[in-house]
Image (cartoon, helix red, strand yellow):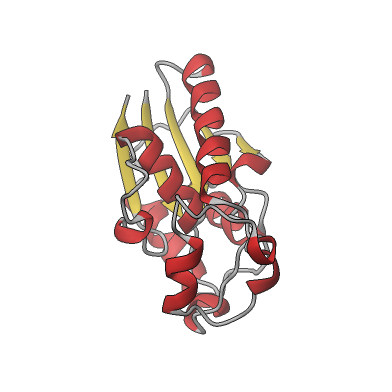
Amino acid sequence: MTLYLIRHGETDWNLEHKIQGDSDIPLNQTGILQAEQVKETLKDIPFDLCYTSPLKRASKTAEIIIEGKCPIISIPELTERDFGKIEGNPITSEQSKKYWNYELNSYDEEVEPVRHLLHRTREFLIKLLKEHKEQTILIVTHGSTLRALHYNLIGYQTNEDFMKFQVKNCQIFQYKI
């Protein structure tokens, strides 16, 4: 199986450095242009299927990239991490330390624990491997979810800095499994 993982295009909240989480924020004009650029980059890849988060910013990115060339399946497992009560707030370094620490793994302020994020993305990957062994799959999702997919594919030590794997808007990652 060949997987292409892509983070959605830019949103206004990305520009404002706000925590988006599972708030349904749409792409801005730059995000649409970024998705168009990815479409051009991947135009010769024969995708069998595309999975996407149901949130607008990811699903619209997927629609632009795929442009009707294969089915797009929207699934909740690819939704961005739920940041609870801190969604919509500016990102701070204190929050980054607190909410990205696997060992703390608290549910403070209703933020989805890192363990839960890793578990739900691992379950999705297991299902994907069973159903699509020899296929080429595009996955369009969010920064946190993409990180969790990445760590499930390459391995993750619970004392690692989850945020060391940086993910830019519309960045393409390819994995052969």
Could you tell me which residue is drawn at 45 percent across and 50 percent down? 103
How many numbered circles does the render carry? 0
Query: In this orientation, does residue 117 appear?
Result: yes
Examine the rendered structure and indicate whether residue 47 appears above or below residue 55.
Answer: above
Examine the rendered structure and indicate whether residue 93 appears above or below residue 56.
Answer: below
Could you tell me which residue is drawn at 35 percent across and 57 percent down? 171
Q: Locate the C terminus and report the quarter of the image it occupies.
A: top left
Could you tell me which residue is drawn at 37 percent across and 41 percent down? 151
Examine the rendered structure and indicate whether residue 127 appears above or below residue 69.
Answer: above
Viewer-side residue, 156 vs 143: 156
Q: Is residue 94 left or right of residue 61?
A: left
State the image coordinates of residue 147 (x, y, percent, origin top left): 41, 50
State the image coordinates of residue 141 (x, y, percent, origin top left): 52, 50
Q: Locate the N terminus and report the quarter of the image it occupies.
A: top left
Could you tell me which residue is drawn at 56 percent across and 78 percent down? 13
Viewer-side residue, 118 vs 71: 118
State the image coordinates of residue 174 (x, y, percent, origin top left): 31, 40
* Residue that extends furthest to the front in the rendered view of this protein: 104
Query: In this orientation, does residue 166 appear?
Result: no
Q: Is residue 121 left or right of residue 159?
A: right
